[in-house]
Image: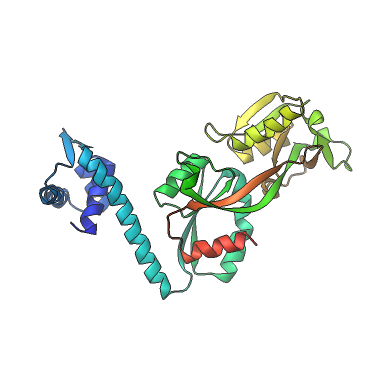
Amino acid sequence: MDMRQLRYFIAIANEGQITRAAKQLNMEQPPLSRQLKLMEQELGVVLFDRNGKRLQLTQAGEWLRERAIALTNQFDETLSFVQELGEGVQGVLSVGAVVSCISLLPPTIRRFSEKYPLVTFKIQEGDHFLLGELLESRDIELIVSRLPFQSDFQSQHYSVLPLPSDPFVAVVPAEWCPDDDRQSMSLQELVRFPFLTLKTDRTTGMHNQIFQEFKQHGLEPRILSECSSVAITVSLVANGLGVSILPKSVMSSFASPNIRQMSISGAEFQSEVGIVWLKDRYLSKSARHFMAIIGE
């Protein structure tokens, strides 16, 4: 059995059908069926239970799939390493970012592109769990994330490069702040207004941190909106619907005369940020240089 056959097997296991797997592999169905039959004959085991057109992995098939994915990933990363020995920094760098970290990318990409103009970026946005899946499947190399990173895998599965902490700021409608010289608001003042929180169904770390800070001061905000979009949350603030607390870096992309950004008096708490990658994965030259630049 060779690497090509392992890739065939993985495609069939992922699709559950010979027809769909052949389409994904850009090949005809009969040759793929023959390859599967040859693999089963060579191994002396049945890899799939046939249930009509649907193929279900047997116990032996499940075992092979797990190891086949690991082998093909290791093979691809080995080839990448060898190829990079004789090349400069080029190719495609796939980066994921949580919604509240998107604003960290433009200045980093600008500085990176000035040094390494042959690199093209592929950028994915999502919550911790989605990005964790993309990292596991090797669709992305790095994640720019709020910490701690939450996913379906244990924290020991990842390596983390901490970045400078990001202070939280109060984001309030400008019309509620007639005093233009005012630079801060307290949690006691903020709690009087409807609160707009940045939160997804599964990623709640930043939301919990903010509300724990309120709780430590004996306060409980009235939530008007839970939203996974920074843009929508800021838009609601700009339209006078409530206040929010967001990392300061987020607001660099949302300047508006309808919004006031203030420090939070009496509550100096920070949002932790970092780069996350698979602990056992080879990182490309591009990824290593990107990490060096974003950490400057």
Q: Quadrant of residue 115?
A: bottom right
Asked if 293 appears above or below 168 in the picture, the reply is: below
Q: Is residue 75 left or right of residue 207?
A: left
Q: Is residue 64 left or right of residue 206?
A: left
Image location of residue 63, percent across then percent down: 25, 43
The answer to which of 83 and 242 lies nearer the viewer is 83
Residue appearing at x 65%, y 32% in the figure: 197
Image color mode: rainbow
Residue appearing at x 74%, y 29% in the figure: 216
Asked if 38 appears above or below 199 in the picture, the reply is: below
Q: Residue furthest front?
A: 156
Image location of residue 133, percent across then percent down: 43, 44
- The tally of labels here is 0
Q: Quadrant of the N terminus?
A: bottom left
Q: Is residue 127 visible?
A: no
Q: Is residue 94 left or right of residue 31?
A: right
Image location of residue 37, percent across then percent down: 12, 48
Q: Is residue 226 visible?
A: yes
Q: Is residue 51 left or right of residue 150?
A: left
Q: Residue furthest bottom?
A: 86
Asked if 188 appears above or below 206 in the picture, the reply is: above
Residue appearing at x 53%, y 69% in the figure: 117
Image location of residue 172, percent across then percent down: 76, 36
Q: Quadrant of the C terminus?
A: bottom right
Residue appearing at x 49%, y 52% in the figure: 277
Asked if 191 appears above or below 285 in the picture, the reply is: above
